[in-house]
Amino acid sequence: MLVRAARVSDLASLTQLAVTAGAVLTTLPASEEDLSRRLRNVEASFRGEVEKADADYLLVLEDESGNIIGTTGMLAAAGLRDPWYSYRLGLTVTASRELQVYRQHPTLFLVNDLTGASALCSLYLEPQHRGGQVGRLLSKARFMFMAEFPQSFSSRVIVEMRGVSDAQDRSPFWESLGRHFFRMEFSRANYLTGIGSKAFIAEMMPKFPLYACFLSEEARNAMGKVHPDSESNLEMAQEEGMSYQGYIDIFDGGATLEAPLKQIRAIHESQVLVLATGTPGDTAESFLIHNRGREGCRITCAPARVAAGTLVVAPETAARLGVRAGTPVRAVSLCARQA
């Protein structure tokens, strides 16, 4: 399996992948026109020709036959062109000694606190390939790129997790809140989000604090939760040190995770080693390995061992990365080592 930079030539494959993903992948709408526009910007971003406010780094996952089976991406600095809205969960207390009343009310505040953060996005893997190392490779590969080019990203990294919805794509949070201000289905709101209209929708929503007690019980229970299909993505993000700090998505109430860039495990533990080819041996463990390329970015996961400042891998791993023995690569263990 190989993760590489997306290209305009991937348009047909990505359009088909977007059709397969459906509403799950809001940032990759099944529209050739929208995808073509995005891929042109992605190519320019990898070439370093785009300002941080517009930079969009989309990676694709290829199987052994070269077919694209997944995507993952990073926005360098979210919200520097259009406002980036979130709800922050707070607490309002009302009390009266005379009446012997004391109440705590969870409260939603519409904020732009996460503006400028680098946002992880567009994570999707075909269902038949999920689980095991493939999912971890796709999720964590972007951290290798960020570790190699930290100057292209912000000091804070966020990821909006998919919120709770049912088999009919009905979001209880949207039904109890958003629908009152927009006469549209949640799927339509999701589509508009994916093509960049999130700020416009958010600006139509009430700016004053909202008491969560006015929402349905189902909606309250969905706040800060993730969709069952995204629980593995949540676990992988948490493995890397990302955590929920009280921010949720304005549409489906899904949790937003965050962490300082330098404190993400795969970033601060990664190191530059000289690649050596041979037999990794019985003591080999799974490593994420990046060829350190930008436009020619190639990242894989393979058995390897560290020996005297070198990373020993099988010859086919070096070939997959497009490098030869003696080339410096960036590497980190796929999973955190147990204490």
Image: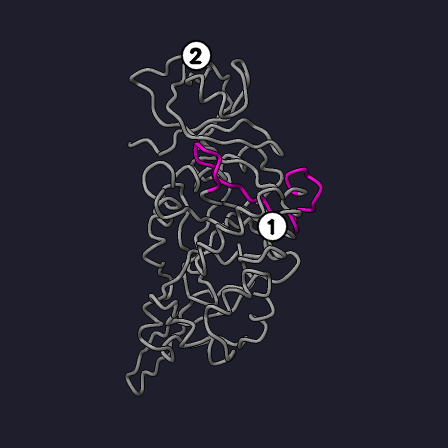
Evaluate if marks 1 and 2 touch, with contact meaning CB atoms under 8 Å apart.
Answer: no
Work out whether mark 1 precedes mark 2 in sequence or the reverse, and give the earlier one: 1
Q: At numbered mark 1, what does the secondary structure look like: helix, strand or loop?
A: loop
> What's the residue at 46%, 50% (across, down)?
258
Give the position of the N terminus as an image quadrant: top left
Looking at the image, which is closer to me, 79 or 66?
Answer: 66
> Residue 44 appears at what percent x and percent y?
68, 42
Res. 308 mark: 2
Q: Which mark is residue 100?
A: none
Residue plotted at (30% across, 82% down): 101
Whole-percent x, y for residue 172 in the image: 37, 72
Residue 59 belongs to magenta span:
yes
> Which residue is denoted by mark 1 in the rendering?
77
Q: Residues within 10 Å of mark 1 (few under 14, many from 20)?
A: many
Q: Secondary structure at mark 2?
A: loop
Q: Horizontal placement of 2 versus 215: left or right? A: right
> Residue lying farthest right?
49
Q: Can you tell which quarter of the image residue 282 is in?
A: top left
Residue at 62% from the left image edge and 38% from the top image edge: 151
The quarter in which the C terminus is drawn is top left
The verdict on residue 41 being magenta is no
Q: Position of residue 327 (x, y in %)?
A: 55, 17
Q: Residue 166 falls in which quadrant of the image? A: bottom left
Residue drawn at point x = 57 percent, y = 49 percent:
75
Side of 239 where 148 appears, left or right: right
Residue range corresponding to the magenta coloring: 45-68
